[in-house]
Image: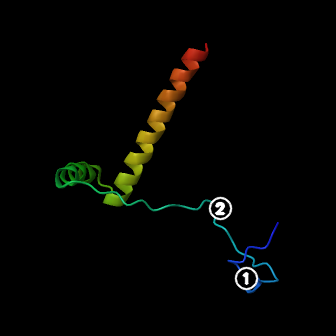
């Protein structure tokens, strides 16, 4: 590997740095909703009794999992 002049040797430490990586690192998504969408989500969220963030989190995961199960079921039928 050749030396890249954009990165002088001083940028690198002689000793490695030990770090702890989260077992299951997360991500934060910014999602924008229209006023009507917020109103609709809020009505369902209040009826569920769950706080808004957990409601959106749960609905997103339930939807993704249901779609995956449906996709996998469809693939299993094609394979048979």
Nearer to the camera, 15 or 27: 15
To which residue does mark 1 refer?
8
Q: Position of residue 65 (x, y in %)?
A: 48, 39
Q: Residue furthest bottom?
A: 10
* Residue 32 horizontal side relative to residue 27, left or right: left
What label does residue 23 carry, if any? Answer: 2
Mark 2 surroundings within 10 Å by alpha-carbon count, few (fewer than 14), some (14 through 19), many (20 or more): few
Q: Residue shown at 38%/57% (left/top)?
A: 54
Q: Residue shown at 82%/66% (left/top)?
A: 1
Element on which disc 2 rests: loop
Q: Position of residue 55 (x, y in %)?
A: 35, 53
What label does residue 68 carry, if any? Answer: none
Tag 2–tag 1 contact (CB < 8 Å):
no
Q: Residue shown at 18%/53% (left/top)?
A: 39
* Residue 2 horizontal side relative to residue 75, left or right: right
Pick whichever of labels 2 and 1 is earlier in the sequence.
1
Q: Is residue 68 above or below residue 56?
A: above
């Amino acid at each position: 590997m050749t030396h890249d002049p954009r990165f002088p040797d001083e940028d690198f430490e002689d000793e490695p740095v030990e770090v702890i990586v989260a077992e299951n690192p997360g991500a934060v998504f910014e999602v924008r909703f229209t006023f009507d969408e917020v109103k609709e989500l809020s009505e369902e969220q209040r009826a569920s009794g769950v706080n808004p963030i957990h409601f959106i989190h749960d609905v997103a995961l339930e939807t993704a999992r249901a779609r995956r199960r449906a996709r996998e079921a469809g693939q299993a039928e094609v394979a048979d």
